[in-house]
């Protein structure tokens, strides 16, 4: 019996041959694996210049959800947002799939963006620009229409993933009980949000400093739309908070981000009041996702602190959201 795997690395030679055939590329095709996580990201060198390639993790998205992502990126790019557009295959489709040992994996080739990604040292000025960029992404997607369906779906994902986090606290009943209460409380609070007060629409889903870059001409670009989908627009802001919370960035940077956002799309009163809730949801969901997919919390690059560090973060923002 071949032992099952949760996430394989596709053979570079076979992948190059498949890319050449499906995209009609000429000459040698060379791959450089840049990162692994929920997706494997490659830089491809070929005669027509560099491209980016994303190989999705098995089960990350259905084909319908993956098609939504590609259509959404193309839509906002057509409205002036600089983003890595999917490159059509020779048959006109925007992605294809292969059967890996662990299951089906979707693959998309995208335009390469050359620039400087932001990092944890982002200051107030850049945060203001990034906030304005997120609002522009929301405005560009306001008229997005597609037959495909994809929701950010924090509620069902939290129901699915929280038990993996609770397993870390099986011998700590007080902490386990707190996380169980917090999980139920945020479900109830999100269910009570009125769409008339807290609008929904297409969202990036993960616009934090590591998923935006400054291009050579000084303009900004946004990438990594794997978590995109329909959601509360104002909840998209919480991704920026979340990354800064882990990096110890001062709250003034978050305030500058929100000010930048509101310079393009003012928040309603209800959207402002929901920010502590959205921040808590983000911390709960990401930590639970780490527990499920990585099966380890610290040390993992980018998430290299102890479990208690993450628990303290969740407790802090639970208190701000009125969850005890």
Image (tube, rainbow, N blue to C red):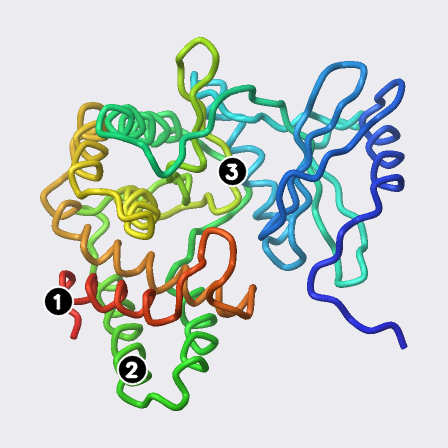
Residue found 46% across the figure and 43% down from its top: 228
In the displayed structure, would residue 195 be above or below residue 115?
below
| Extreme-top residue of the structure | 217
Mark 2 sits on what residue? 175
Judged left or right of residue 195, residue 34 is right
Q: Secondary structure at mark 3?
A: loop
Mark 3 sits on what residue? 224
Mark 1 sits on what residue? 322
Comparing 59 with 172, the one in front is 172
Quadrant placement of the C terminus: bottom left
Q: Earlier in the sequence, mark 2 or mark 3?
A: 2
Q: Residue 126, position in %: x, y? A: 29, 25
Residue found 44% across the figure and 64% down from its top: 157
> How many residues crowd around disc 3 within 10 Å: few (fewer than 14), some, or many (20 or more)?
many
> How many residues crowd around disc 2 within 10 Å: few (fewer than 14), some, or many (20 or more)?
some
Q: Which mark is residue 129?
A: none
Q: Residue 42, position in %: x, y? A: 68, 36
């Amino acid at each position: 019996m071949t032992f099952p795997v949760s996430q394989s690395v596709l053979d570079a030679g076979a992948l190059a041959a498949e890319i050449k055939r499906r995209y009609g590329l000429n000459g040698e095709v060379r791959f450089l694996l840049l990162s692994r996580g929920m997706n494997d990201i490659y830089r491809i060198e070929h005669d027509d210049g560099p491209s980016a390639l994303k190989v999705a993790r098995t089960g990350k998205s259905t084909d319908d959800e993956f098609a939504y992502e590609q259509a959404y990126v193309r839509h906002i790019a057509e409205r002036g947002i600089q983003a890595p557009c999917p490159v059509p295959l020779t048959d006109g489709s925007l992605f294809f799939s292969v059967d890996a040992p662990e299951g089906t994996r979707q693959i998309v080739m995208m335009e390469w963006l050359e620039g400087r990604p932001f990092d944890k040292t982002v200051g107030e000025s850049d945060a203001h620009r990034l906030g304005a960029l997120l609002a522009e992404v929301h405005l560009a997607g306001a008229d997005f229409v597609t037959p495909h369906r994809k929701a950010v779906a924090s509620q069902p994902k939290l129901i699915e993933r929280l038990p993996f986090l609770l397993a870390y606290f099986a011998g700590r009943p007080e902490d386990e009980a707190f996380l169980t209460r917090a999980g139920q409380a945020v479900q109830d609070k999100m269910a009570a949000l009125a769409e008339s007060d807290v609008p929904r629409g297409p969202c990036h889903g993960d616009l934090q400093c590591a998923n935006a870059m400054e291009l050579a001409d000084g303009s900004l670009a946004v990438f990594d739309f794997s978590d995109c989908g329909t959601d509360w627009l104002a909840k998209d802001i919480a991704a920026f908070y979340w990354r800064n919370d882990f990096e110890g960035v001062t709250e003034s940077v978050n305030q500058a981000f929100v000010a930048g956002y509101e310079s393009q799309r003012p928040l309603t009163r209800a959207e402002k009041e929901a920010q502590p809730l959205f921040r808590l949801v983000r911390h709960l969901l990401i930590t639970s996702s780490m527990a499920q997919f990585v099966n380890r919390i610290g040390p993992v690059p980018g998430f290299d602190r102890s479990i208690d560090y993450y628990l303290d973060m969740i407790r802090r923002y639970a208190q701000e959201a009125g969850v005890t």
